Image (cartoon, helix red, strand yellow):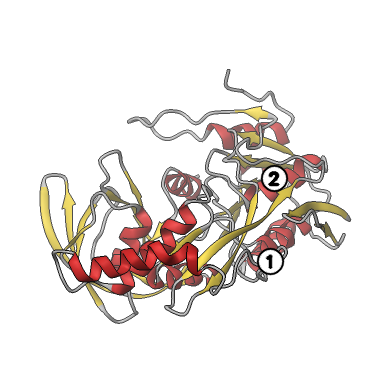
Amino acid sequence: MTTIRQIMMGLLAAFILFGSGYLIGQSPAAPIHFFGAAAATPEQAEEAFEPFWETWQLLHERYFEQPLDDQQLAEGAIEGMLATLGDPNTRYLSPQAETAERQSFEGEIEGIGAEVTTDETGAIIVVAPFEGSPAEAVGLLPGDILRAADGVELTGLDVGEAASIVRGPAGTTVHLTVQRGDELFELDVVRDIIRVPSVRGEMLEEGIAYLRLSRFANDTAEELHTILEELLAQEPKGLILDLRSNPGGGLGTAVDVADEFLTAGPILVERFGDGREELFEATDEGLAQEIPMVVLIDEGSASASEVLAGAIRDRERGILIGQLSFGKGTVQTWQELTNGGGVRITVARWLTPDGAWVHEQGLTPDFIVALPEPGNEEFNDTQLQAAVDYLLGRPVSVTE
């Protein structure tokens, strides 16, 4: 069970690689949708924008530190405009973050290859370096704290911001300040192209197949199909699909993945702002339509993960075990801007086959099972064990 424990270490952290940002619950290939005419053309908006240009001019004429960074001012104006919508999923990405998020969908990123999280102090902590990565080669260890990169302090930044500082083109070097216990030391790490698979699979004891999906990237459906073929050839008694701490990804990918498990019928409905609806359905050509199935979810299972888990629940294809999911029921599309950055815009809400909107509600598991509190004892994956017990017809221990 060593592999499962290693996977669970990642589940307790944000799945962010230094070298990649992470796009949550987005549809990168989706077109931009406009509902009705634009509220105003630039000419018609001249009066509304007069205070903006007055402020711009005043800053350039009177602000006490000159010169000003016009790009920074423009990006700040965009961020402020989007913030007025009160939708955290409609947002601006800098050119660096835009590039990193697009790379993450391709499954290849340029960076050092370390999975990290943050703690309550804002420290950037290494969960684990990836096997064969530059981070592993220079000796980074789980628990190391990355204090600075190329002289830029990382503590206090969110994980995405820290990642954008450490990432960079393959072949270039980043200078890291690392804390290990009470020791502070320096490392030079040569960045590389890191291949990050989104699907893992193995046979557990007692004949149960295990599939772990970490995100819904461009090639996730193909990876899943290949691993499913290998697992099903071993005639497992049941299948566990682990979506814990999977923050989502491409909507089209979620539909393709769901199609492997569902017979012909609905997967989800998209409902747009003009009332129009689009139904997504399974094709009845999947590999795993009949094998007994359990889906593991938790508070980190969001968006595309909830699309998949919700469809399996509503179609009575399998049961859910774990904790209440995140609750993200909207769909975003993106548009690249002329400065190399981009905007993510919420264009629709999505509904489960039974018409449920999970937004800010989440999916409630059929069996609520908590993980044990971290301690010195060997980790016991109670949620995974509950799934195995259910598939083998044994009593399931639930959390009160």
Q: CA distance from mark 2 to mark 1?
A: 30 Å
Within 10 Å of disc 1 (Cα), the crowding (few <14, some 14-19, many 20+) is few
Quarter that holds the C terminus: top right
> Which badge, 2 or 1, is on the more N-terminal residue?
1
Q: How many marks?
A: 2
Where residue 350 sits in the image (x, y, percent)? 71, 50
Specify the amino acid type for callout 1.
Phe
Specify the amino acid type for callout 2.
Ala
Element carrying mark 1: loop
Q: Are marks 2 and 1 in contact (CB under 8 Å)?
A: no
Where residue 2 sits in the image (x, y, percent)? 46, 47
Residue drawn at the location 77% of the way across and 52% of the way down = 268
Q: Which mark is residue 82?
A: none
Mark 2 or 1: the one toward you: 1
Residue drawn at the location 44% of the way across and 77% of the way down = 340
Residue drawn at the location 64% of the way across and 67% of the way down = 38
Residue 273 placement: quadrant: bottom right
Q: Which mark is residue 34?
A: 1
Where residue 218 sits in the image (x, y, percent)? 61, 69
The answer to whether residue 50 is seen in the rendering is yes
The answer to whether residue 113 is seen in the rendering is no
Residue drawn at the location 42% of the way across and 66% of the way down = 50
Element carrying mark 2: helix
Query: Of 268 and 295, which appears nearest the observer?
Result: 268
Q: Circle 2 is placed at which residue position? A: 309
